[in-house]
Image: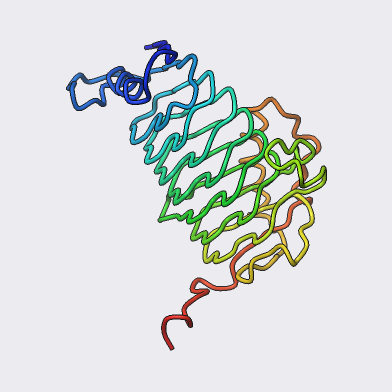
Amino acid sequence: MKKVIDAKDLKYRELNSNIRLVLGQSHFSDKKIEGRVEITLNNVLGHRYIGDGLKEDHLININGIPGNDLAAFMDGPTIEVFDNGQDGIGNTMNAGKVIIHGDVGDIIGYSMRGGEIYIEKNVGFRCGIHMKSYQEKIPVIVIGGSAGNFLGEYMAGGIIILLGLYRQELAYFPYWGTERLVGDYIGTGMHGGVIYIRGDVASHKLGKEVKIVQIDKEDEKILNKYIDNYCQYFDTDKGDIKTDQFIKLIPFSHRPYGRLYTY
């Protein structure tokens, strides 16, 4: 089933209520939806909370710029945004995919615990903060461009991949110049998970809790899998992206601040 919703004259509450009604996930409807539903949202402009808490394998296409907390607590659908995104995308997301054809703001994947987020270009500050994983759930964020300060802050699990393909198009941080790949304080407080960065990173940019280690065969499999997805979603040539161009960051300890509280 396919459905088109024009968000132009709708408040964010009305828009989200309409989406839930179509998917049969509204408190005001007990209608059971069979099969995958594809919803296209037109004229989206700052509408908050799209996709929040939605379940099952549905598809939401967004034409326009959604507001904060896109896909928060989402548990299954795929959301594809054909423009930029704002802050808090994937907040505590449990499953599903988010694909953004542009730049995004801060705290992407905050406390994310499952699913995948693909950003075509650049992200702001604190991307991946408090990401975590449990058993078979491994959240993944793939960033095509550059990242701001505190990438992977307090990260407890999951995977962040930074490709650096758009580092010369820093729409969010023009004062950085044209060569900056990632900001400072990478992995501060990190105690789980892994960060892959395509390119060299100066040691002074790293948080005290992380170290650089060599890429191995298992890392190459992980990188190839998610880079393939990125290239497919954004029609990008993979030829120039080699796994031997990446560094790998992991935490020194699973309890970096243990001594601050106990002896």
* Residue 222 in the image, given as x and y percentages of width and height: 62, 48
Residue 246 position (above or below residue 234): below
Image quarter where the C terminus lies is: bottom left
Residue 77 position (above or below residue 32): below
Q: Nearer the viewer, residue 66 or 208?
A: 66
* Residue 248 in the image, given as x and y percentages of width and height: 68, 59
Q: Which residue is drawn at 57% across and 40% down?
A: 105
Q: Residue at x 66, y 27 (%)?
A: 234
Q: Is residue 10 left or right of residue 109?
A: left
Residue 247 position (above or below residue 123): below
Count of numbered badges drawn on the protein: 0
Q: In this view, does 128 lie to the left or right of 35?
A: right
Q: Which of 116 and 262 is in front in this view?
A: 262
Quadrant position of residue 8: top left
Colouring rule applied to residues: rainbow
Q: Which residue is drawn at 43% across and 26% down?
A: 47
* Residue 34 in the image, given as x and y percentages of width and height: 28, 18
Q: In this view, does 241 lie to the left or right of 50?
A: right
Image quarter where the N terminus lies is: top left
Q: Residue at x 65, y 49 (%)?
A: 148
* Residue 63 in the image, given as x and y percentages of width and height: 53, 18
